[in-house]
Each structure stands twice: as C-alpha cells, then as structure tokens.
Image: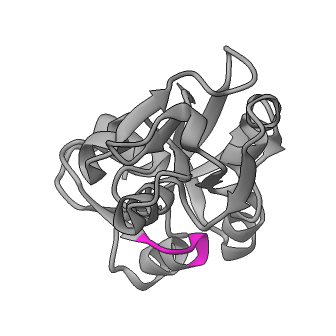
C-alpha cells in the first residue's frame, strides 16, 4: 500500500464521527470507509487483524507534543508508517442549541484537545472534563441536553450532533496542528 493508493478499503481511526481523526480520514482518504474505534488499541488491532487495511492515527501535536498513548501503542504494535500529514486543529466550544456561552460550566473532550485550550477554558471559568474523544464528547453533550455542558471538538461536529458553536478558535495557539500518520500492518 502506498500513500496515494486509492483502492477503496477500510481506514481505522480512534473516535466517534465528528472527531478530528474522523475528519482527517474523510479529508485525506475520502475513497475509504472510515471505521471508528473507541480506543487507539482498537484501531491498531483492526489493522493487525486485517479488518481494516490501514489506520490514521494522531501521533504529535504542535502545542502539547507527543500524543499518548497513540504514539507508544503504534510503536509497540510494529505498524508501518506509510505517509503523514500535519493538519491545522481549530477547536470549537459546542453546546446545545438553546445554550449561551454564559451557561457553560463544564467542557468535555479528549485530554489532548483539552490541553490545547486550557488557558482559554480557565479564562472563561469552565471546568475541563476528560472523555475518550472529541466526537464522543459532542455526542454526549447533545444527548444530555444540558445547557451547562459543552464539548471541545471540531466545528463540523456541531452539524453531526445538532449542536451550536458557542465559540470558535478556542485553541490557545493559532498555529495549533496535529500530525496524523497513516499506518499499515507489518509485512508477514
């Protein structure tokens, strides 16, 4: 498999629809079926078992450094890096449609995403709540219907889950980027 291989297949990612990894799959491998897994290990196992022919995994962020446990897990699994791409990461604060920014008390997201906007959340007196994924956080906020809860996720996740963007560009640094690497299983 090469980075330019456009034969339709299945690309694994960690997260729920609307997560940054899901967006990366849709943008970088639009010919593949994007298959989400709750954990990085689940996405890696799908490649090792042959269920998915590749995985797109975030391994580094310009603000927080190495994305763990993803970087360690792919190294331990012996996956082969095929290509990589640095993608801009713009964080949005998403709430239920009737919420106002002043209503929000907590913001849920993946720990790495929360680290990327910790200063902004502190300035707004919003408590960070760690969950497994940015897209999953948006889904949970939508399901709860609570104006005091928000998600830190891509703005496109608002469309997926029927949420409103309460604030765009929540990230603490304007040049915030994440390096996504396309991995395949090692040759047998």
Where residue 152 sits: x, y (%)? 56, 44
Q: Which residues are magenta?
A: 37-41
Residue occupying image coordinates x 43% and y 42%: 99
- Residue at 47%, 35% (x, y): give it: 100
Q: Nearer the viewer, residue 176 or 125?
A: 125
In percent of width and height, residue 161 lies at 29, 53
Q: Position of residue 148 (x, y in %)?
A: 55, 53
Residue 81, how many percent across, how many down? 58, 51
Q: Is residue 46 above or below residue 21?
A: below
Residue under the point 22% across and 61% down: 9
Is residue 2 something that shows in the picture?
no
Q: Quadrant of residue 39?
A: bottom right
- Picture layout, residue 149 above or below residue 168: below
Q: Is residue 33 left or right of residue 141?
A: left
Total numbered badges shown on the rendered structure:
0
Q: Is residue 153 left or right of residue 50?
A: right
Image position of 51 (left or right of 68)? left
Looking at the image, which residue is at 55% across and 61% down? 133
Is 101 placed above or below 105 here? above
Of 186 and 143, nearer the camera is 143
> Quick one: 75 or 37, which is closer to the camera?
37
């Amino acid at each position: 498999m090469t980075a330019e291989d456009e034969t339709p297949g299945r690309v694994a990612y960690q997260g729920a629809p609307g997560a940054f990894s899901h967006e990366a799959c849709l943008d970088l491998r639009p010919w593949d079926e994007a298959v989400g897994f709750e954990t990085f290990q689940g996405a890696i196992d799908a490649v090792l078992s042959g269920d998915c022919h590749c995985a797109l995994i975030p391994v580094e962020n310009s603000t927080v450094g190495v994305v763990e446990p993803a970087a360690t897990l792919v190294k331990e699994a012996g996956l082969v890096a095929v290509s990589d791409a640095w993608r801009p990461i713009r964080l949005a604060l998403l709430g239920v449609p009737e919420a106002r920014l002043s209503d929000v008390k907590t913001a849920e997201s993946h720990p790495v995403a929360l680290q990327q906007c910790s200063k902004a959340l502190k300035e707004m007196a919003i408590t960070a709540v760690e969950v497994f994924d940015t897209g999953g956080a948006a889904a949970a906020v939508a399901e709860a219907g609570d104006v005091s809860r928000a998600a830190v996720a891509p703005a496109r996740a608002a469309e997926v889950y029927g949420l409103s963007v309460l604030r765009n560009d929540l990230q603490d640094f304007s040049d915030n980027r994440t390096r996504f690497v396309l991995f395949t299983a090692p040759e047998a």
